[in-house]
């Protein structure tokens, strides 16, 4: 049991990390779709509804762009 | 008369105040527009990064370029424009080494927007690992893909060859290796087909049943050649009857 614990913990952490990253991409896709559908002047309002500022939004976009998997997911989801 | 004078003085005194009241509103509107542009412009950044990766720049280089842009506090929209220019340059001239360092140096020197895009293009033209920077539209990476496709085709792996073609679709040169790949395929398949009629012409009847039983082996001319004496070479149906 003691031997398994670190392995299980590392699996849990790995899964959690992936989920968190995937969650960011999902959040970005949700917001991006809303931004695309809305009037340009409502952009800030939409971000505010998601509790996000323009700076935070840009930071999120940088983060996703830097990660090939997240960027691919973002691109694919937006293309739907 | 006094009242008129007083009124005019008062109005003159009030006008600048009204103008002052409007003045802050304009920057607010400008700020709002800028924020809107930033937000909407940022939408494209992940897609531009993907486009640059697909053009042939490796992940580390893309990440380094993005980091350089981030460190210099470029807006995401500006970074997207940068990556867009880089993607086009990579497509045209091939990737360069140390893309991130190059972007960093250009940003350090104060280049932004069109100047930065132009510098990226010039760098790729001079040092791109494509066609010696002579302006041909395809990159080394694409050539490699093309050769891969040809290799796969020569091994008979059609689907890989087609995938490579789908990925290429950039410029006339990309079609070259792909076209070769398809030609080899075509030749292979024609080889079988061509062997059929030739063999039929020579071997006549015996080739008929063999070809029916094993279409892939239709090119086995030895068995067909043995029966070359019999007439009616192309008519498999007739030749099949006597065998039965």
Image (tube, coloured by chain):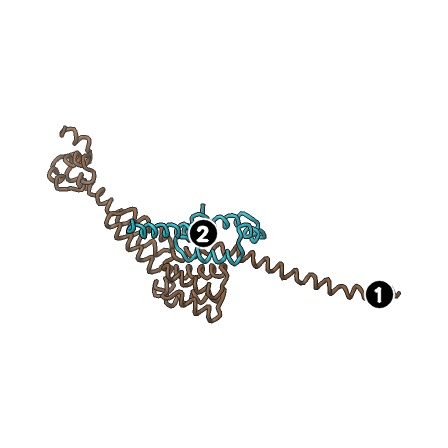
Q: Which residue is drawn at 80% across and 64% down?
A: B10
Please state the horizontal and vertical placement of residue B39, each as a whole percent of the image: 53, 56
Q: Which chain appears cyan?
A: A
Please state the horizontal and vertical placement of residue A19, each as a whole percent of the image: 41, 49
Q: Which mark is on residue B114?
A: none
Q: Which chain appears brown?
A: B
Where is mark 1, residue-wise? B6
* Dot 1 alpha-carbon crowd within 10 angstroms: few under 14, some 14 to 19, many 20 or more: few
Where is mark 2, residue-wise? A24
Q: Which residue is drawn at 43% across and 63% down?
A: B67
Q: Do labels 2 and 1 share a chain?
A: no
Q: Which residue lies furthest to the bottom in this view?
A: B109
Kindly identify which chain the residue marked by label 1 belongs to.
B
Q: Tell me the quadrant of the picture where the C terminus of chain B can be found.
A: top left
| Secondary structure type for disc 1 | helix
- Which quarter of the figure has residue B193? top left
Report the side of A70 relative to A47 (left or right). Answer: left
Q: Residue at x 25, y 53 (%)?
A: B151
């Amino acid at each position: 049991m003691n031997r398994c614990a670190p392995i299980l913990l590392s699996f849990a952490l790995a899964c959690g990390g992936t989920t968190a990253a995937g969650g960011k991409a999902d959040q970005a896709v949700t917001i991006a779709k809303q931004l695309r559908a809305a009037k340009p002047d409502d952009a800030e309002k939409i971000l505010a509804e998601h509790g996000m500022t323009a700076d935070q939004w840009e930071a999120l976009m940088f983060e996703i762009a830097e990660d090939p998997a997240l960027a691919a997911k973002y691109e694919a989801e937006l293309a739907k | 008369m006094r009242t008129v004078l007083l009124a005019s003085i008062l109005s003159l005194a009030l006008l600048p105040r009204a103008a002052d009241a409007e003045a802050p509103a304009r920057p607010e509107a400008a700020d709002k527009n800028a924020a809107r542009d930033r937000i909407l412009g940022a939408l494209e950044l992940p897609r531009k990064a993907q486009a640059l990766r697909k053009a042939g720049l490796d992940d580390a280089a893309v990440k380094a370029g993005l980091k350089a842009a981030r460190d210099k506090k470029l807006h995401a929209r500006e970074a997207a424009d940068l990556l867009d220019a880089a993607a086009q340059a990579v497509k045209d001239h091939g990737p360069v080494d140390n893309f991130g360092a190059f972007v960093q140096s250009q940003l350090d020197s104060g280049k932004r927007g069109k100047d930065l895009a132009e510098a990226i293009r010039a760098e790729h033209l001079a040092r791109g690992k494509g066609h010696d920077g002579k302006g041909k539209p395809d990159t080394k990476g694409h050539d490699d893909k093309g050769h891969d496709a040809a290799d796969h085709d020569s091994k008979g792996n059609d689907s890989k060859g087609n995938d490579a073609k789908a990925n290429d679709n950039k410029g006339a040169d990309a079609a070259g290796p792909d076209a070769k790949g398809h030609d080899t395929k075509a030749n292979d398949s024609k080889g079988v087909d061509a062997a059929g009629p030739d063999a039929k012409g020579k071997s006549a009847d015996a080739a008929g049943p063999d070809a029916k039983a094993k279409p892939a082996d239709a090119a086995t001319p030895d068995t067909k050649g043995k029966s070359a004496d019999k007439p009616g070479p192309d008519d498999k149906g007739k030749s099949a009857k006597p065998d039965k």
